[in-house]
Amino acid sequence: QTDIPAVKSVVTEFPVGAAITGAEITTEHGELLARHFNSVTPGNALKWDATEPTENTFTYTQADPLIAFAKAHDMKVRGHTLVWHNQTPAWVFQDASGAAMTATAENKALLLARLENHIRNVAAHYGDTIGTWDVVNEVIDESQSDGLRRSNWYNITGLDYLRTAFKVAREVVPSAKLCINDYNTNVAAKRDALYNLVVKLKGEGVPIDCVGHQMHVNVSWPSISDTEAMLKKFEGVGVEQQVTEMDVSIYTSSGESFPTPPADRLLSQAYMYRDMFALFRKYKADLTSVTLWGLADDNTWLDTYPVARKDAPLLFDTRLQAKSAYWGVVDPS
Ligand code: XIL
């Protein structure tokens, strides 16, 4: 479909992007991507297990073609992600004898050294080509009284992994925007915990430029007002905000499963995209990019998460045709 407006030509308040996980830069997927979007996020290719599968052996074979495609089509790139508790090889958290690290001073020093080496190599490999990095991903757990996720990173280093990650990233790629990224930031307890952490770390001089809101939502959740409260919360903290992984599941509970997407769900989805994008555009002074977690419904992580079932959370269908969701974004009348 080349007769319909490009998303990026309609939504001009900020770059609009899509995450790419596989062979999507080839054939029609690549055309669709370059036609509608001006930003791209490698969905898996820059995660630790892809870039440093064994210690100090760096491989960029997955990410390099995506980055080259972005460059050739004048698209921005979001780097996702330098530090996470998932998709991180086991060796990272093993001590010198190969046993799981316990919280000792020696292990802490070893883990921080591995973290620093990882960031120095990966960030330097891409330099200015990657304008924004999700330096850390999903570090909040609002069920903890201090709001901090008990990951291996936290259990072994406390807050020092965050301090080291941002400090080293700033040193290696001083012009890149450095983000802290998380999900469910529209939920009051979660956003408050994230807010408190950002204020604390920025107060110490930790170079955080940006808060990333993943925005994995569904056709009836969350409300626009909770989402607006999320954006408002981080105004005035001295950070940019980005929507980093938006998709709108057709499911409202994990028990549901439809063989094909019901018409009423697709309509609710279009309204959700319409209302969310209207909100984002209203907050253009705070929001510096909006990225969808995928291109078309033929390839979405929600087909396997949280359970195996066919989902349809994106703007284009399994045949790459524009859905009502697309029209909700480009023609909100
Ligand atoms: C997902 C990818 O899309 C999947 O292909 C992979 O199997 C698991 O990770 N939050 C994040 C992303 O920050 O990195 C996740 O991506 C989706 C949830």
Image: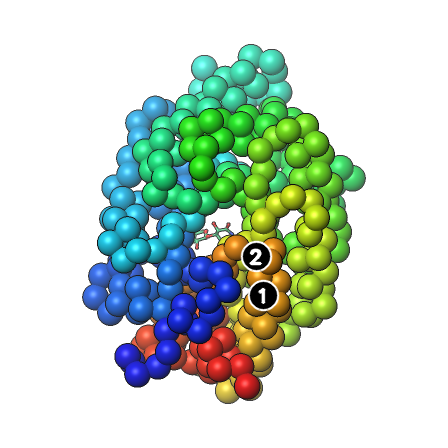
> Who comes first in sequence, dot 2 or dot 1?
1
Q: Which residue is at a point 52% across and 40% down the rendered structure image? A: 178
Instruction: Identify residue type, mark 2.
Output: Leu
Asked whether the viewer can see residue 37, the reply is: yes
Does the numbered disc 1 mark a residue whose Cβ is under 8 Å from ligand 1? no
Q: Look at the image and tell me in which quarter the C terminus lies.
A: bottom right
Q: Residue 237 location in percent, x, y?
A: 69, 45
Q: Secondary structure at mark 2?
A: strand
Quadrant, the N terminus:
bottom left
Picture coordinates of residue 90, whole percent (x, y): 45, 31
- Residue at mark 2: 287
- Residue at 45% x, 33% y is 174
Is 315 on the left or on the right of 219, as rendered? left
Foreground residue among 11 and 31: 11
**Residue 303, x across and y down, in percent:** 44, 65
Q: Circle 1 is placed at which residue position?
A: 280
> In the drawing, does residue 213 fall left or right of residue 21?
right
Q: Quadrant of residue 105?
A: top right
Label 1, secondary structure: give it.
helix
Would residue 138 appear left or right of 75 to someone viewing this image?
Answer: right
Quadrant position of residue 260:
bottom left
**Where is 3 relative to 61, above or below?**
below
